Image: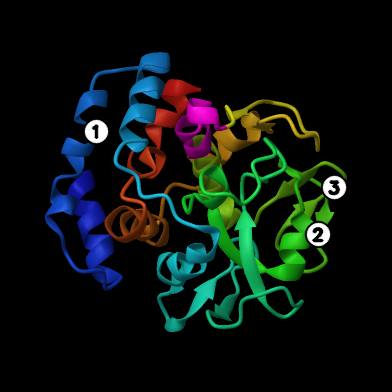
Amino acid sequence: MLATTLLMGVLAAGVPQSPAVAAEGDYYAAARGLHGAALKETLHDIISSRVTTLSYGKVWDALEETDRDPANSRNVIGIYSGRSMPWTNHGGGGNQWNREHVWAKSHGDFGTAPGPGTDVHHLRPENVLVNSERSNLDFDEGGHPARYAPNNNLDDDSWEPRDEAKGDVARMIFYMAVRWEGDAGSPDLEPDDRTSRGKDPRIGRISALLEWNDEDPPDAFEKNRNEVIYQHWQHNRNPFIDHPEWVDDIY
């Protein structure tokens, strides 16, 4: 049923059918029947195998396809604002968009070198001013409307995304925690239930992220994005988009 639903979303978005779509179940074959720590460890092995690592410059090209506006193929959609923005208008100006690290790169101090800093599964387009306003805030509920994206809230140590992006954010955070486990010198990323702005490889608040995963299930845009990354760019998947129930199983 999942493979059929995923395939329909991909075809609707204009992505060519591939045998890999129908074989999605085989991708997770080693994880079937596992739970908790064993499931997390096996998913880490699956999504870390045969991965193409992008340069930070190549991320621009990837985002043009992964976050394309279904209503305007020349535009991309901002993760927090929901705005449709011309793909060509990216850079550092206030009216441009740049590459938002949903898992803030300072939380683990991994920068933009190939690895977690260029993992497209958590890199999303967003207006420069919105990106700057979110900064490296953790995720939680509450606060006051953001100046440049008032459908989001923030306070001194946290950012609450718009409702339509809450599940997306949660599943990106959980993906990063499973994908980047300290192998080969990478940071060991983990969510916790605190909010702070330090350089430790952790981010919160996990209690909010768990709720958001349940309240905002994957939609067609998110599923298509996962498929495009798998088919055309990194060749790995976010398992929590394919199986959001695995979040509660692991965490």
Per the rendering, the mark at residue 28 is 1
How packed mark 1 is, by other alpha carbons closer than 10 Å (few <14, some 14-19, many 20 or more), is some
Q: Secondary structure at mark 2?
A: strand
Residue 8 left/right relative to 146: left
**As shown in the figure, which amino acid type bears the numbered disc 1?**
Tyr
Sequence-wise, the earlier of marks 1 and 2 is: 1
From the image, give the main secondary structure of the stretch colored magenta: helix
Q: Give the answer, above or below, for where 194 lies relative to 6.
A: above
The residue labelled by disc 2 is 145
**Seen from this angle, which residue lies furthest right?**
156
In depth, the one of 249 and 190 nearer the eye is: 190
Is residue 183 shown in magenta? Answer: yes
Q: Which residues are magenta?
A: 175-186
Percent across and percent down for residue 188 are 57, 27
Q: Secondary structure at mark 3?
A: loop
How packed mark 3 is, by other alpha carbons closer than 10 Å (few <14, some 14-19, many 20 or more), is some
Mark 1 vs mark 3, CA separation in Å: 39 Å
Percent across and percent down for residue 147 are 83, 66
For the question of whether residue 32 can be seen, the reply is: yes
